Image (spheres, rainbow, N blue to C red):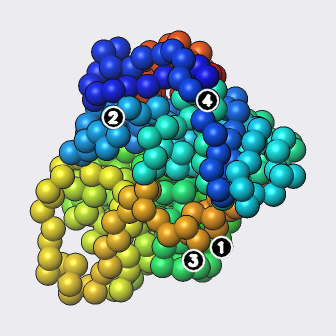
Amino acid sequence: MRAAWYDEQGPAAKVLQVGELPDPEPGPGEVRVSIAVSAVHVGDLGKRQGWWGSTMTYPRVIPHGDGAGIIGRVGAGVDAARVGERVWVYLAQSYRPFGTAAEFVVVPAEHAVAIPAELSFDDVAGLGIPGITGHRAVFAAGPVEGRTIVVTGALGAVGRAALAVAKRGGAKTIAVVRRSADLPAARELGADHTLAADHTLDADSGLVAQVNELVGPDGVDLVAEVAFDTGLSVDVELLRYGGTITTYATRETQPTVPYWELAFKNLTLRFLSNDDFPEEANRTAAADLTAAVQSGDLRYPIAARLPLDQIATAHDLAETTPAGHRVLITP
């Protein structure tokens, strides 16, 4: 098969190679998917570059956890009727060496999700990493009907998913973006309220004041936080007693935590890493995300589509693409 891979971590142009590798075969409980579209995510870039202290777990890696295509073969124990099924896949390169940047990928059967007939491969190819993370950020503690949820970084890939599933789950949603200039784009996401955070915390027009005006001084139930280190102090102010922060990213890897402010409000901190969610949570998220795309509640704009031979360019583009926009590769 045609595939892209790297044998060492480093810059895209230096380490990514494209060529022929042996066709993979599905084992028990697995399916082989003929990839139509492979999606690039920041997590793929991080693994390739060694961000967050990551190392090469395998001597050779085919990148990308997300993609979509058609099941061509099934392993023992998998219903043969799934052959020919259009699917999107997730966690393809999680605790496995070979992801979707290839003509074929093998994944556990439950990580291949049927695509409704009216949806294209493009619609769902990049759902896995950001979508399941966003779903977990909202539902890790259970149902959210009637709760008030703040989603920071709302235009980002995870933020878009979190907003969509929170709203579908019956929550009151407040989308927060970094700059006032982003508000028009954010309003199209369908949140109940959309606010900008480009004011100081103690200003009369600051984010806390804006949220209090909407929900009252008791605060919100949950904040899904994209920037834990810089957002934490504001999140503490936003939350009600007994509220929750779920966070999946930070710039500073060892941020200062205001212990007593958190303790006095009995707040819960929940840290999320996409590779290690419970399988039941993954399955629920996959079904909910597919339904959200099908209904039009969740959409990801496409920034670029490149052939496999240009994967290094695609990785570089993904680092500078506007938040929430996808870079796709066609093997």
Q: Earlier in the sequence, mark 3 or mark 2?
A: 2
Q: What is the x, y in percent for residue 228?
A: 28, 58
| In this view, the mark in front (3 or 2) | 2
Q: Quadrant of the N terminus?
A: top right
Q: Mark 4 packing: few (<14 Cα in 10 Å), some, or many (20+)?
A: some
Distance CA(mark 4)–CA(mark 1): 45 Å
Distance CA(mark 3)–CA(mark 4): 44 Å
> In the drawing, what numbered circle is on residue 59?
2
Distance CA(mark 2)–CA(mark 1): 46 Å
Marks 4 and 1 in Cβ contact (< 8 Å): no
Left/right placement of residue 6 relative to residue 11 reads right
Q: Nearer the viewer, residue 82 or 192?
A: 82
User: Which residue is tagged 3?
Assistant: 144
Q: Earlier in the sequence, mark 4 or mark 1?
A: 4
| In this view, the mark in front (2 or 1) | 2
Marks 3 and 4 in Cβ contact (< 8 Å): no
User: Which residue is tagged 4?
Assistant: 23
User: Please, what secondary structure does the residue beneath circle 2 have?
Assistant: loop
User: Please, what secondary structure does the residue beneath circle 3 have?
Assistant: loop
Q: What residue type is disc 2 on? A: Pro
Marks 1 and 3 in Cβ contact (< 8 Å): yes
Q: What residue type is disc 3 on? A: Val
Q: Nearer the viewer, residue 50 or 306?
A: 50
Distance CA(mark 3)–CA(mark 2): 43 Å
- Asked whether the viewer can see residue 76, the reply is yes
Q: What residue type is disc 4 on? A: Asp
Q: Earlier in the sequence, mark 2 or mark 4?
A: 4
